[in-house]
């Protein structure tokens, strides 16, 4: 039976997953079926790509495995086997595809700057009653007395 792409999008069940993009560190809780047993396997890594359209949309997650070997998995976005997706950290990157991370080894392969939201929050400003100029002027007046003046005062 041949289904047209427009019919496939109507019949497919698309998961409600949180917003994420390339550079984000995510944990994908994926349902693994082994014979009669069903278990959930978490896979934590950096999203290096999102591709496709509609039901065939996929995303690639890369993590560093044992002995510094990179492990990549491609997850279909509309898969019923994805139980949940947790965005651990949001990354600040300037590319849509982070394939350059494949050439990195060890710690360098996981370095992505963190994005703290779209709104910049300025640090708190503490107001003082005296300005530093006033404080400097007071100290200068106290030190301006010469040794002769202090001797005459005795």
Image (cartoon, grey):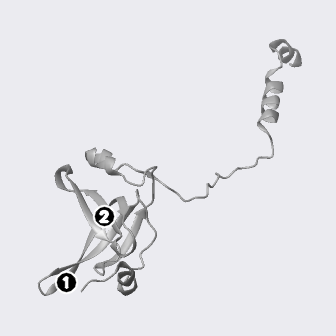
| Pick the front one: 36 or 96 | 96
SS at circle 1:
strand
Percent from the top left, x then y, of residue 54?
39, 74
Percent from the top left, x then y, of residue 82?
31, 77
| Pick the front one: 58 or 68 | 58
x 27%, y 65%: residue: 74
N-terminal-most mark, 1 or 2: 1
Q: CA distance from mark 1 to mark 2?
A: 20 Å
| Pick the front one: 123 or 40 | 40
Residue 57, compared with residue 130, is above or below; it is below
Q: Which mark is residue 38?
A: 1
Q: Residues within 10 Å of mark 1 (few under 14, many from 20)?
A: few
Q: Which residue is mark 2?
A: 44
Residue found at the far top of this picture: 148
Tell me, yes or no, whether the two marked residues, 1 and 2, touch with CB atoms within 8 Å.
no
x 37%, y 54%: residue: 97
Percent from the top left, x then y, of residue 39?
21, 80
Q: How many marks?
A: 2
| Pick the front one: 142 or 106 | 106
Q: Residues within 10 Å of mark 2 (few under 14, many from 20)?
A: some
Residue 117, compared with residue 109, is above or below; it is below
Percent from the top left, x then y, of residue 50?
37, 62
């Amino acid at each position: 039976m041949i289904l047209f792409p427009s019919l496939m999008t109507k019949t497919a069940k698309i998961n409600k997953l949180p917003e994420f993009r390339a550079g984000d560190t995510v944990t994908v809780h994926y349902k693994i079926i082994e014979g009669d047993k069903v278990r959930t396997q978490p896979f934590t890594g950096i999203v290096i790509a999102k591709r496709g359209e509609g039901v065939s949309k996929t995303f690639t997650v890369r993590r560093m495995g044992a002995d510094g070997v990179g492990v990549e998995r491609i997850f279909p976005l509309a898969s019923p086997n994805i139980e949940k997706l947790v965005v651990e950290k949001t990354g600040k990157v300037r590319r849509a595809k982070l394939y350059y991370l494949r050439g990195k080894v060890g710690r360098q392969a996981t370095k992505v700057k963190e994005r703290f939201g779209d709104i910049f929050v300025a640090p708190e400003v503490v107001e003082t009653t005296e300005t530093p100029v006033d404080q400097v002027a007071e100290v200068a007046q106290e030190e301006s007395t010469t040794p002769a003046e202090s001797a005459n005062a005795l």
